[in-house]
Amino acid sequence: MTKPAFRLMACLAGVAVLASGAQAQLRMSPQMGGSTSGGLGAARPVDTSTRPADFIVAVVNSEPITNNEVRNRLVRAEQQMAQQGAPMPPRDQLARQVLERLVTEKAQLQLARDNNLKVEESAVDAAEASVARQNQVSLPELRRRMAADGIQLSQFRADLRNQLLLQRLREREIEPRVRVSDLEVDQYIREQQGSTDIASMEINLAQVLVAVPEGSTDAQAAALQAKAQDIATRARAGEDFSGLARQFSDAPDRASGGVLGLRNAERYPPLFVDAVQALRAGGIAGPVRSGAGFHVLKVIEKLQGGLPGVNITQSHARHILLRPGPQLSESAARERLAGFRRRILAGQADFAALAKENSQDGSAQAGGDLGWSNPGQFVPEFEEALDALSPGQIAEPLTTRFGVHLIQLVERRENTLSQREQREIARNIVREKKLDEAYINWIQDVRARAYVEFRDPPQ
């Protein structure tokens, strides 16, 4: 169950869904050079003005893309960029990027269907539950908030299904192509040991956003700036930042304490990076002004060179794995594991004994024991469920691409990485970079092989 390079896009998308829909769909792919099949060029400007009726703006291998699809995705993109403080390109330019993104998505989804790839309903259920966990709300509360924001549940689940399908397609088409040599690992470590460049830095930030509504007067903006300054002062005085975010932030990440996640510095808005560049972990910056409002930032973690610190938190877990097939449906596997969980919690059965008797994983003879694991060692959905547990707790049955799991966290510990473990982490980082490059090349090829016709709006 080693971790695939491509994260579960649907779950990542859900972090921002309370305000803006599926975030994973908003990341603009590089502009695909050249012309489309049939001699057609790049995406034309899209008419995003309000019209009484919908119309087709493009056809991808006979499958249409409508103006409403583009408009809805465009609104999500604008909301997301405003909340992150990212520079906003001209609307017609962003609309062309959104349309191009939809074209490449359609082409990939068609390829997935042509290869008979499917996503089970239970996998969509698990992804939706993951979104709720990331937002620290119950599933009913997540759905209530989506309804309040005008997001239809059926469309949200369809978006999750598509993202899961795209993930499986990438795992099938790209992962087998990428290999990392020892020489590449050595070179990466040498480069990082001598690097102080901001581009090689990874940062985990949390934010409190005090939004400034469009059309606010100077006096109103000044009052909001004073509010943000007060929040920053309280944070610097030691008040819990996550509590401040939940109480005051206008960003959708407020539910998770404003945490934006560990990422390369280049993936944060430049104004965020500039504000925190000289700070250490725990430092407070701001308020800084963006198009969305005033941001108060906290540095949760800062890693130079992309390698994690030597000291890490390790998890000791065990699991029972059932693999659905002709004799066992996925729903039946989940019900069976749920029964095991009830028996274990009631003291009527032993986890290790059930694993030896029933698990279809190589760890079965060891009672399902997976040993000590480092962060990032398992596939994202497995690791997310494990991270949410306290020692001794057992998660609800979980579906991954390996099957259905019943997971128990045995214990956690702080540990120092050995040289071998550090090299393995470096290898994974290099592999992810190579997978990203392979993905770009692959998607360009998929896009180039698709027949795309762009249509003018009706007069």
Image (tube, helix red, strand yellow):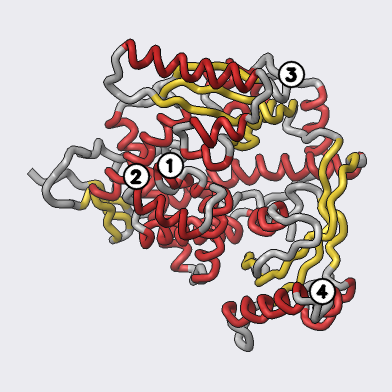
**What's the amino acid at mark 1?**
Leu
Toward which corner of the image does residue 430 lie, by quadrant? top right
**Contact, CB < 8 Å: mark 3 with mark 1?**
no
Q: Among all residues in the image, which is located at the extreme left?
A: 459
Q: Residue 20, position in %: x, y?
A: 40, 43
Q: Is residue 337 left or right of residue 243?
A: right
225 shown above or below 87: above
Return the residue at label 2.
Answer: 73
Return the residue at label 1.
Answer: 26
Return the residue at label 4.
Answer: 351
Q: Is residue 369 left or right of residue 285?
A: right
Q: Of helix, strand and loop, which one carries label 2?
A: helix
Q: Residue 447, position in %: x, y?
A: 42, 49
Return the residue at label 3.
Answer: 196
Toward which corner of the image does residue 340 lie, by quadrant? bottom right
The answer for how far apart the CA atoms under marks 4 and 2 are is 46 Å
**What's the amino acid at mark 2?**
Arg
205 shown above or below 175: above
**Between 269 and 229, the one nearer to me in the picture:** 229
Q: Residue 269, position in %: x, y?
A: 52, 25
